[in-house]
Amino acid sequence: MRLRGPMNAVVTGIYAVLLAALLVVAVDSTGGWRRVPPVTPAEQTPVPSATAGLDWRGWRIRTAADVLQLVLIVALGLTPLGARFVHLVAPRGDTAHAAAAWLLILAAVAAVAGLPVWAAAAGLPMWWWQSRMRPARPELFRPRRGPDQLAWAVAVATGLLSLVLWVFQLILDIRGKSGAYPDVFTAAVVTAWLLVLMRLMLILRLPQSDRLSDLVSSLPGGPRVRVVSGWPSVVATMGVFSLPRRPVILVAPPVAAALTDRELRALMAHEVAHVRHHDTRRRVLRRLLAFFSALAAVVALSAIPALRTLAGLHGRRLSVQAGPFLLALYYLVVRVLCAVELRATRAEERAADRDMLSLSGDPDACTEGLAKLSSLLGIPDAWTLPQRLLFASHPATSERLRLLRDLAPVTDAPVTDAPVTDAPVTDAPITDAPVTGLPVRGARPRSATAGRVRRGLLAGALVFAALVAAGELSGHRAIAMPADAGKYRVLLPRSVDGSSLDGTSKDAVQLRSSVWGSGDLGRFPGAVPVTAVYDQQGQSWLYVWGAYGKLADPSGELSAFWNKFDALPFGLTGTGDPEPAGPRGGYLQCEDDTSTCAWADNSGIVVVSLSPPGPQSGVIVYFGAPITEQQLAAMTLSLRAAAEVLAHR
C-alpha cells in the first residue's frame, strides 16, 4: 500500500487501534473484563499452616523499581529537561559519539530499574533483594554452582548481546544507514532466535519427575503431560512452558519437596487445566498483538508535532537524539497494553483454579496446596493498584482462596484421604471433555462466550481488511491531467550563485546514472530527466536533479520523494517545510536537516540539495559557510526562475 504524507501516520494509527481492539476482544474471551470484588475482612479465609518462605519485600521492591523505571524513561524521552540532557550528551545526534552516549544512558536506566526484556525486573533493586534473601532461604534460589550454571550464564550473555544489537539496529535505522550494515540486523535476528533455542534446550534436557508424572496421570482422564523438575528462573516456582510440539509442566525442586502428594496433585491439576485451555499459546498471541500494536502506535504518535516539540525534536529527520523519545513512547504504550493483557492472565488463573477443584476432587488439598505455595513464594494476600497494573499475573492469595471456598462441592459426601495409587500412565490424549471430578458451583464453561468472541474477531478482521482495501484504492486514485501540464521545460543554467556547472566529474556521472535508480524519483508520462552538479572551489557542493514533462499530481510526487529521500525508522516518513513557491505557483518544500529543497508543479519536479541522492542522501560534504533553510529556499527560487522556460520555445 502506498500512502503519502500524513496519511501514513493516520493509517498506521488506525492499525494500532485495530490491533488494540483485537487484544481487548481476546481479553474479553477469557472473562478478563468481569469485575472481581475485593476480599473484605469478613470474607477472609483462614489460611492453613504454611511453610515459611520468601517475604513480600521483593514485590514492594519490584513495584518501586518499575515506577522508577517509568519515571526515568518518561523524563528522559518526553520532557524538555530530558531533551536538554540528551542534546547535551549527544550534541549533533548523528555521530558515533552520540550513539555511544545514548547506549550509556540506556544502560544506566537498565541498571537502576531494569528494562523489561526477557527477565522480569532484572535490575539492581531485585538483585539486592535476592542477595539479602539467599542466605536466609538458600534452597529457594537456583544454585550458583552446578552443571547448568554455565548454560544459564551463556543464555544471559546471549540476551544482553541481542539487546545491544537491536539497539544498534535502531540507531542505524534512525540515522538512515541500516542498508549499509545489513549484517547487524542479521546478527540481531540470529541472537534472538539463539536465545529462544537455548531456553528450549535447557528445558528439554531437564529430567522427568516420576513422582510428579504419576500424580498427573492419576487425575481424571489420565492426561499425558510431561512433568520435569528444574529451575525455570532464579527463584523457585512452577508453571507451564510451551514447547513446539507440546507443553511441559516445570516444577522447581524446593516446591516439590515442601508439599505433600495430595497438595502436589491439586496443583498439578491447576497446571493441567492451563494445558487443556491452551493458555500458553493464547498468551503468546496476546503479547504479539500488544507488541505490533505498540510499534504501530509509536509510528503514529511520533508524527504528532506537539510530542516532537516536547521532546526537543524540531527537525523533520530523526537522529540518535530521538532514541529516548521513541523508547518512551514505546514503553508507555507497552505498559498500557500489558496492563490490559494482565487482566486476561488473571482470568485464566481463576478458570484454572475452578478446574483444579473439579479435576482433583479434593477441596482441602487445593486450599492447603495453594496457601503453602503462596507462602513459599511470598505472594501477598492482596495486590496494590500499581502492582495489578504493572506485573500481577495471578490473583491475590486471599482472592483465590475465596474462590475455592465459594466453589464448594454440591454433594455433602465427605472427601476421603485415600492414598494416591501408582496407576499406570495411559496413552489417552488430552481432550476438552468434561472430567469426572466433583461438580462445583459457579463454574461457567469457557465455551459460553466462544461464539461472541469469534464474531468479534471476525468483525475486527473484516474492518481491518476494509481499511486496507480503502487505503489501496486511495493510493491508486485517478487524477485528471490539468490543461497547463507540461507548460514549462527545465534548462539548468551554467552557473548558480557564482558556482560553475560540472558535467564531467565522477559525481556528475554518478548523479546522471542514479537519478532513475536510487535517486528517489519515479517516472511519469513524458518525463525528461535533468541533472547537474555545481562546483565551488573545485569541490562538488550543490546537486540538482529531477525531471520535466506532464505531471498530474505534483503534491503527491513531492510526498513520494520525501518518503524515499528522508526515510525514518519503522516505515515513518517525513515531509519538507512549505516555502513560498514564487510567481509560477506549484509547491516548494525545504528541509533543514539535509539542506534539501524541492519544487514541483504540473511541468515537473526538481530537487536542489547539498547532499547527493541514493544511499548517500543526507551526507553533506561541504566545508563552506553554513547555509540556512531560508537561504537555500531563496537559491532554489532563483534557480527555478532561470531554469524553467516555456516548452514551445
Image (cartoon, helix red, strand yellow):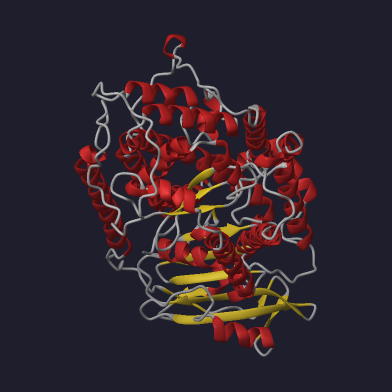
Report whether 267 appears left or right of 491: left
In the image, residue 582 sits, relative to residue 251, either above or below, namely below
Question: Would residue 19 be seen by someone viewing this image from the given angle?
Answer: no
Q: Position of residue 174 (x, y in %)?
A: 62, 59
Judging depth in this view, the residue of 528 and 101 nearest the camera is 101
Q: Count up the numbered dots.
A: 0
Query: In the figure, 196 relative to 533: above or below?
Result: above
Looking at the image, which is closer to me, 77 or 144?
Answer: 144
Q: Is residue 125 visible?
A: yes
Q: Nearer the viewer, residue 94 or 602?
A: 94
Q: Nearer the viewer, residue 423 or 559?
A: 423
Q: Residue 487 at x, y = what percent?
A: 39, 73
- Residue 278 image offset from top left, x and y in percent: 35, 50
x, y percent for residue 394? 47, 34
The residue depicted at 71 percent of the width and 43 percent of the height is 109
**With 398 as the anchor, is 348 left or right in this view?**
left
Q: Quadrant of the N terminus?
A: bottom left
Residue that appears at 77% across and 53% down: 101
Q: Residue furthest top?
A: 42
Which quadrant is the C terminus positioned in? bottom left
Which residue lies at the image location 49% right of the left edge and 26% below the top edge? 397
Asked if residue 287 lies left or right of residue 185, the reply is left
Which residue occupies 62% across, 46% down?
325
